[in-house]
Image (spheres, rainbow, N blue to C red):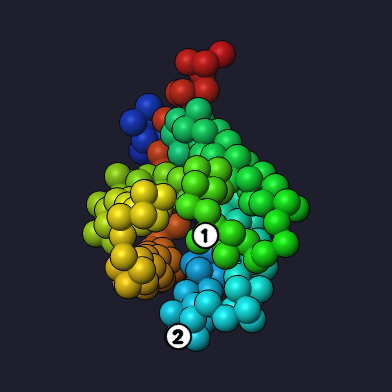
Amino acid sequence: MTTQQVEIYQGQFGEFTITQSDRTEVIIYRAGLAVAALSLAIGSIFLLSLGATPTVLQLLTPLFGVFSLSLAISLVTIHIYLALLQRLLQLFWLIGTTSAIVLLLTNSQPLALVIYNQPLTILGIGFTFAALTGIYFKEAFCFNRLETKLLTFLVPGLLLGHITSILPTETEKILLALWTILFMIFVGRKTVQPLPPDIGDKSVFVYLKEQNN
């Protein structure tokens, strides 16, 4: 009987191994991002091609629900050295989701229409996208990828532009399309990226945990 050899990695603070649990977490993290990107793409395609028809506006609400839930899964399984930063992104998601639920319960109009007609609602629901932007920033910092660098500035720019009403509608449509394309490129590249880089240096996690004890 042969024994499967376990690969040992050299980290900054010592050696470590990667378990199947680590790999599963990364797969779930990437799957969550992929579903979120797909939800955004479907909504954007319908909105940009058909316009804000009643049917499209109704469709955007459940798509946002899928987007938000998928993002939550990624925020739970993401590997970030600073646990406080991960908790902060999760808090952002919670604030944004709570705001979305409140808007749904207090308005008879579709969620997308409420947000479009009342830009200041983004100050609440926008925290969901702030959490996503945090992921973009983490990916840009760790892997130096152009699409995540652009997304780190594009998403807040689009939201702030809508809040302040300084962006023409056509410009918002262009930025939404660009966001969708870059997000799909991002998750596409994550699909073929090896798993260990997303797991990170586990010796750093151990070191930071020991420092906090």
Hey, which residue is sitting farthest right in the picture? 105
Quadrant placement of the C terminus: top right
The structure residue drawn at horizontal position 42% and vertical position 44%, both measured from the top left corner, is: 134
Q: For the residue marked with disc 1, what is the amino acid?
A: Asn
Q: Position of residue 100 (x, y in %)?
A: 64, 51
The structure residue drawn at horizontal position 52% and vertical position 23%, both measured from the top left corner, is: 209
Image quadrant assignment for residue 169 = bottom left
**Residue 4 appears in the figure:** no
Q: Secondary structure at mark 2?
A: helix
The structure residue drawn at horizontal position 55% and vertical position 33%, both measured from the top left corner, is: 87
Label 2 close to label 1 by CB (< 8 Å): no
Q: Secondary structure at mark 1?
A: helix
The structure residue drawn at horizontal position 60% and vertical position 40%, both measured from the top left corner, is: 95
Please give the label number shown on residue 140: none
**Residue 51 appears in the figure:** yes
Q: Which dot, 2 or 1, sits closer to the camera?
A: 1
Q: Nearer the viewer, residue 140 or 103?
A: 103
Q: For the residue marked with disc 2, what is the amino acid?
A: Ser
Above or below — where is 80 with respect to 196?
A: above
Q: Position of residue 26 (x, y in %)?
A: 52, 54
Q: Which residue is mark 2?
A: 49
Using the numbered discs, state the Cα–Cα distance from disc 2 to disc 1 in whole angstroms: 20 Å
Above or below — where is 58 with respect to 68?
A: below
Q: Position of 7 compared to 64: left or right?
A: left
Q: Nearer the viewer, residue 147 or 155?
A: 155
Disc 1 crowd, CA 10 A, few/some/many (<14, 14-19, 20+): few
Q: Position of 196 compared to 142: left or right?
A: right
Q: Nearer the viewer, residue 152 or 51?
A: 51
Q: Which residue is mark 1?
A: 117
Q: Which of the marked residues, 2 or 1, is nearer the chain's N terminus?
A: 2
Quadrant placement of the N terminus: bottom right
